[in-house]
């Protein structure tokens, strides 16, 4: 399974050669998270030159989200906010990418392998087809909208917190796996401790989110396996926050009020009664060796 990533910024990661076999051109990637068991991964990919690849089949469910530039998937042109998903076994048309394009690439249930194929290649069940959307042309829907929001929240008696808006890009009709954009209005807050029965993965696109361990800014990323408790979040007061969210099933919020983490004990060989030691201090997580600690004026 993928390790818990709580949380990182892409600026603190190094570039690798992109895992895009049979492609013509130069591309590099940063590994936001990587499953060393089956090859599933979430990647930031930059194309240094024009790039192209023939039609074929991925060994993993594969998603591309365009943050900058232009991607042509068959006859579909995708600019900023463009997205496609090819479920495992579904033919991906030939792709052409302009130099300077930046994308998020997600692989699930498989690694980077890709096999050239034609449109006559055997496919999967009719429920799984290539999905192509242009999010700039989509409307935002209130997360509490029973028709367009999160249906499982309502079916299981959940209470989505008002003030969030979504654009659903992909949802597996069988498993409920989904990928969507979420926008939080300025000052929106989810204050209880929360956890979910599915993994939760997020990449911040715009604005900022204040959080226990720092501030989620554009380029910030986290991956939480199922049942990892977290909180709380407060969207920035100026523009709120917009982020891409993925889950491997319908997201249900399980809340815990009056949460407390407490560590008690008696000092043995440190503290005020012992020389050359210091009293305990609140330790802030270190962002990286190069960037130092996370800075979050909201919680200072």
Image (cartoon, rainbow, N blue to C red):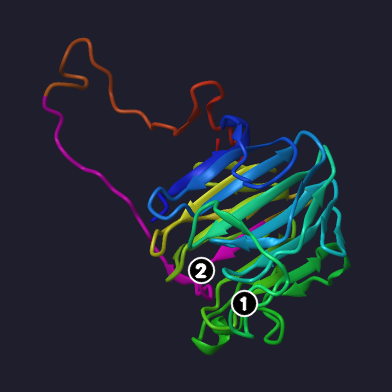
Q: Residues within 10 Å of mark 2 (few under 14, many from 20)?
A: many
Callout 2 secondary element: loop
Which quarter of the rendered picture does the C terminus lie within?
top right
In this picture, is 272 found above or below 193? above
Q: Is residue 202 above or below residue 135?
A: above
Q: In the figure, 70 relative to 272: above or below?
A: below
Q: Residue at x 60, y 84 (%)?
A: 151
Q: Is residue 93 magenta?
A: no
On-image quarter of the N terminus: bottom left
Instruction: Indicate the secondary structure of the residue bearing disc 1.
Output: loop
- Foreground of the two, 9 or 54: 54
Relative depth, front residue between 130 and 214: 130
Res 258 → quadrant: bottom left
The secondary structure that dominates the magenta segment is loop
Label drawn at residue 205: none
Residue at 78%, 55% in the rendered image = 95
Tell me the residue that label 2 is attached to: 248
Q: CA distance from mark 2 to mark 1?
A: 22 Å
Q: Which residue is mark 1?
A: 123
The magenta span reads 244-268
Of marks 2 and 1, which one's residue comes earlier in the chain? 1
Instruction: Where is residue 45? Give x, y as percent.
Output: 67, 42
Residue 12 pos. (x, y %): 57, 30
Residue closest to the far left? 268
């Amino acid at each position: 399974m993928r390790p818990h990533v709580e949380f990182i910024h892409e600026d603190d990661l190094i570039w690798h050669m992109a895992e895009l076999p049979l492609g013509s051109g130069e591309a590099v990637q940063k590994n936001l998270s990587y499953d060393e068991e089956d090859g599933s991964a979430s990647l930031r990919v930059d194309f240094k030159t024009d790039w192209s690849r023939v039609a074929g089949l991925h060994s993993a469910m594969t998603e591309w989200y365009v943050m900058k530039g232009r991607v042509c998937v068959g006859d579909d042109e995708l600019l900023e906010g463009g997205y496609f998903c090819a479920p495992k076994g579904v033919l991906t048309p030939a792709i052409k990418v302009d130099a300077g394009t930046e994308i998020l690439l997600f692989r699930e249930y498989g690694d980077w392998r890709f096999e050239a194929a034609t449109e006559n290649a055997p496919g999967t069940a009719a429920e799984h087809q290539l999905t192509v959307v242009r999010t700039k042309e989509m409307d935002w829907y209130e997360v509490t909208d029973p028709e367009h929001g999160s249906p499982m929240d309502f079916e299981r008696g959940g209470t989505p917190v008002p003030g969030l808006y979504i654009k659903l890009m992909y949802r597996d009709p069988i498993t409920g796996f989904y990928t969507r954009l979420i926008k939080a209005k300025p000052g929106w807050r989810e204050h209880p401790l929360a956890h979910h029965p599915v993994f939760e993965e997020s990449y911040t696109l715009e604005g900022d989110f204040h959080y226990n361990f720092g501030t989620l800014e554009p380029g910030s990323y986290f991956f939480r396996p199922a049942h990892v408790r977290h909180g709380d979040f407060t969207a920035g007061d100026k523009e709120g926050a917009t982020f891409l969210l993925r889950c491997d099933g319908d997201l249900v919020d399980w809340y815990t009020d009056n949460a407390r983490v407490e560590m008690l004990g008696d000092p043995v060989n440190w503290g005020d009664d012992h020389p050359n030691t210091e009293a305990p201090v609140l330790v802030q997580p270190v962002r990286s060796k190069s960037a130092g600690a996370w800075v979050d004026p909201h919680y200072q």
